[in-house]
Image (cartoon, rainbow, N blue to C red):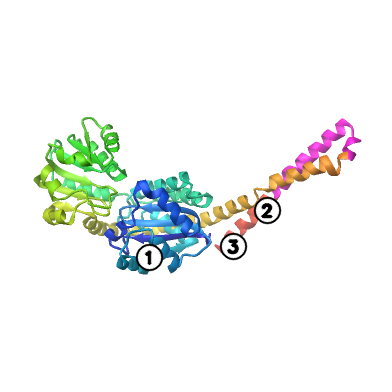
Amino acid sequence: MEQLQVVAFTHQFFPLDLIGKLHIEDTEKTAVLNQIKSKLDLTELVYVSTCNRVEFIMCGSKAMDSKQLQALLGFFPLAPRDSQHLTDAVVLFNGDHAVEHLFKVASSLDSMVIGEREIITQLRKSFEEARTTGLSGDTLRLVGQKLIETAKQVYTETHIAKKPVSVVSLAWHGFRRANLAIDTPILLVGAGQTITNLSKFLLKAGYTQITIANRTFSKALQVASQHLNWKSTGLEELSKVETKFEAIFTCTGSQLPVLDNVLYNSICTPHTRVFDLALPSDCSAELIQELQSRYTGMNELKSEAEMNLSERALEVVRCEKIIQDRVDDFRSTYRQRQLEIAMSSIPFTIKQIKEVAVTEVFAKDLETMDAESKVVLENVLAYMEKKYISLPMKMAREVILGNVKSKS
């Protein structure tokens, strides 16, 4: 397990706009991550990027040191000052500590808002992408499976999410405080998971005048087509839309702002509010300055989220107990899996020994035996083959489980 490492850049130690600089565009993700994997000599890699964290989950024989970290950060367009800040304050985990950290992340104990469920979907997607693109292997497959199981147990057996206040729901509550009519024209910019989740709130509340804009028009059309009367457009065509929107929710993966003063003033009313859930921000600095109190970004949501942490403090203790138990369970499961891999050649080896014995070593002796005796011998050999395969596995498993128990 010591080969399992996590490099974590999170909201707890870095400003959100700096974390946003570690975002990789979807179109470049596989290529860049394969280069990172090769450069750092990793056997497995999973990349997690959310609105408040970027984490590299990896397996490799080399421990992450300052040289390795500089090589990793070299794949991103960072100013020397930013690179130094990231190097100085990065948090590294390995082995059991890496597993415990990931279980806490999946259970939202490390999130901006404890109890938010979005992180489960984000982690599941990250691990699935790594698996399908060949970036990860058996160890991180097992880690991904167990962290999802752990999160589900935490949410089921505690009240950590009794009043969920995710980034999306925080923005939604801010929007609802304006008491806008259900026929209010609303613009959604982006077509990813965050905007999809937000659209569910709008649909449930009965809002009907929704337009979805996205850089890739087909994705906007796909989301809009799921809801009656919702419209879609490409980002480049947005300035031509005649509707004057009274609320905007935006969350894209763009490195550059997609909303500026000119576009805003052409499609909005003087009272339009913007809820910017993107990192980096989807709004230009000039537009944010112009909007002032009508702008809600990730920094504002972070401040509001921190106020909710105390409400869940008592549940954290129960969650941490579950997580510690699951870490112990993972340690046992991981060792059993390593045993299975190490001993996977036993069945083939035993069969080979049997084949050589029958066809070469004792071939002449078998020729003198009658048919009935050969059947008996074959049954004996089959029985011995089965036992010689299962017995070592059973004994080794008992030794591993015994070691786990003795440590606890």
User: Could you say whether the residue bearing mark 2 is in a helix, strand or loop?
Assistant: helix
Residue 165 visible somewhere in the drawing: no
Q: Nearer the viewer, residue 51 or 312?
A: 51
| Residue at mark 1 to residue at mark 3: CA–CA distance | 34 Å
Q: Which residues are magenta?
A: 364-391
Residue 330 visible somewhere in the drawing: yes
- Residue at horizontal 14%, vertical 35%? 183
- Residue at horizontal 85%, vertical 34%? 374
- Queried whether the magenta region covers residue 365, the answer comes back as yes
**Would you name the residue on which mark 2 appears?**
395
**Would you name the residue on which mark 3 appears?**
406
State which mark lies toward you, 2 or 1: 1
Residue 268 point in image, percent of width and height? 12, 44
User: Could you say whether the residue bearing mark 3 is in a helix, strand or loop?
Assistant: helix
Q: Could you tell me the amino acid type at mark 1? A: Val
| Residue at mark 3 to residue at mark 2: CA–CA distance | 16 Å
Residue 180 in the image: above or below residue 331: above
**Mark 2 or mark 1: whose residue is earlier in sequence:** 1
- Queried whether the magenta region covers residue 271, the answer comes back as no
- In the image, 276: left or right of 127? left
Q: Could you tell me the amino acid type at mark 3? A: Ser
State which mark lies toward you, 3 or 2: 2
Give the crowd class for mark 3: few <14, some 14-19, many >=20 residues within 10 Å: few
Residue 276 point in image, percent of width and height? 22, 50
Give the crowd class for mark 2: few <14, some 14-19, many >=20 residues within 10 Å: few
**Mark 1 or mark 3: whose residue is earlier in sequence:** 1
**Would you name the residue on which mark 1 appears?**
90
Q: Nearer the viewer, residue 186 or 166?
A: 186
Q: Nearer the viewer, residue 106 or 263?
A: 263
Mark 2 vs 1: CB contact within 8 A: no
